């Protein structure tokens, strides 16, 4: 077997596009520890940092044939890890919010069953109103609120401007707020 440590990142990327697993392994070994340290520094969790780095390299392998890296590989990888870390932080924050909200509903009151029923009714009401939104508006709302994508990511995915995304989210929230007023009053 050849020694792949002597190849440059560019040469390894070219080999990777031809499905050379040894080139991939060399890139993995070359950058894993530094990417892990960068992720761990921000996430403060070994498991979360490992997961983020693993996701990066999995995606890297899956997209090996279509990768078009226009900058130095370390810059590309550290930019990618930065965005994955932000995504992980947002996901964790959202999960903590849900857990906190559920624990508040069930633990802070003697009327927990009643409050749970109200929360369920509210969730059903809100979901039915989301389904009444225009198709594009509903799709953008879903990507923003349920999948926690940024306006920029949504705009790129749907091939529309960020301003259109903002307008559609504003439109959806305005309609949903109005329907919630009728729910409570």
Image: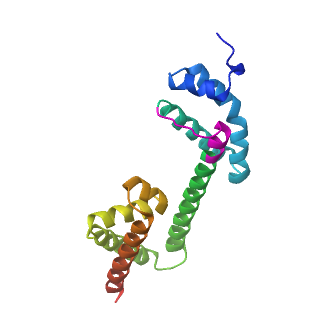
- The x and y percentages for residue 132 are 25, 70
Quadrant location of residue 184? Answer: bottom left
Residue 19 position (above or below residue 104): above
Residue 141 horizontal/vertical position (percent): 38, 65
Q: Residue furthest top?
A: 1
Q: Picture coordinates of residue 104 (x, y %)?
A: 54, 73
Quadrant location of the N terminus in the rendered image: top right
**Residue at image x 48%, y 33%?**
62
Specify the quadrant that holds the C terminus: bottom left
Indicate whether residue 88 is drawn in magenta. no
The coloring applied to the image is: rainbow
Q: Is residue 149 visible?
A: no
Query: Which residue is nearer to you in this view: 156 or 57?
Result: 156
Residue at screen point 54% across, 64% down? 99
The vertical placement of 10 against 36, above or below, is above
> Could you tell me residue 60's position as x and y percent?
54, 35
Q: Residue at the spot x=37%, y=79% of the render?
A: 174
Residue extending furthest toward the front: 70
Q: Is residue 22 left or right of residue 182?
A: right
Q: Residue at x 50, y 71 (%)?
A: 106
Judge whether residue 73 is colored magenta: yes
Report the side of 180 relative to 19 (left or right): left
Give the number of marks: 0
Let me know if residue 139 appears in the view.
yes
In the picture, residue 182 is in which quadrant? bottom left
Comparing 45 with 134, the one in front is 134
Q: Is residue 54 left or right of residue 152?
A: right
Q: Which residues are magenta?
A: 66-79
Horizontal arrangement in the rendering, residue 9 relative to residue 142 (left or right): right
């Amino acid at each position: 077997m050849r020694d792949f440590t002597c190849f440059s990142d560019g040469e390894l990327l070219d080999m990777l596009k031809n499905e050379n697993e040894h080139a991939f392994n060399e890139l993995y070994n070359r950058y894993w520890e530094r990417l892990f340290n960068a992720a761990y520094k921000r996430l403060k969790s070994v498991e979360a940092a490992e997961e983020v780095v693993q996701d990066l390299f999995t995606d890297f392998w899956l997209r090996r044939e279509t990768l078009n890296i226009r900058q130095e590989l370390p810059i590309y990888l550290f930019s990618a890890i930065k965005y994955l870390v932000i995504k992980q932080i947002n996901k964790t924050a959202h999960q903590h919010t849900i857990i906190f909200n559920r624990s508040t509903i069930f633990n802070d009151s003697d009327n927990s069953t009643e409050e749970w029923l109200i929360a369920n009714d509210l969730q059903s009401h809100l979901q039915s109103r989301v389904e009444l939104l225009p198709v594009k508006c509903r799709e953008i709302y879903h990507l923003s609120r349920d999948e926690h994508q940024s306006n920029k990511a949504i705009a790129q995915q749907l091939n529309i401007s960020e301003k259109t995304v903002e307008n559609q989210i504003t439109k959806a929230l305005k309609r949903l707020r109005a329907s919630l007023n009728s729910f409570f009053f």
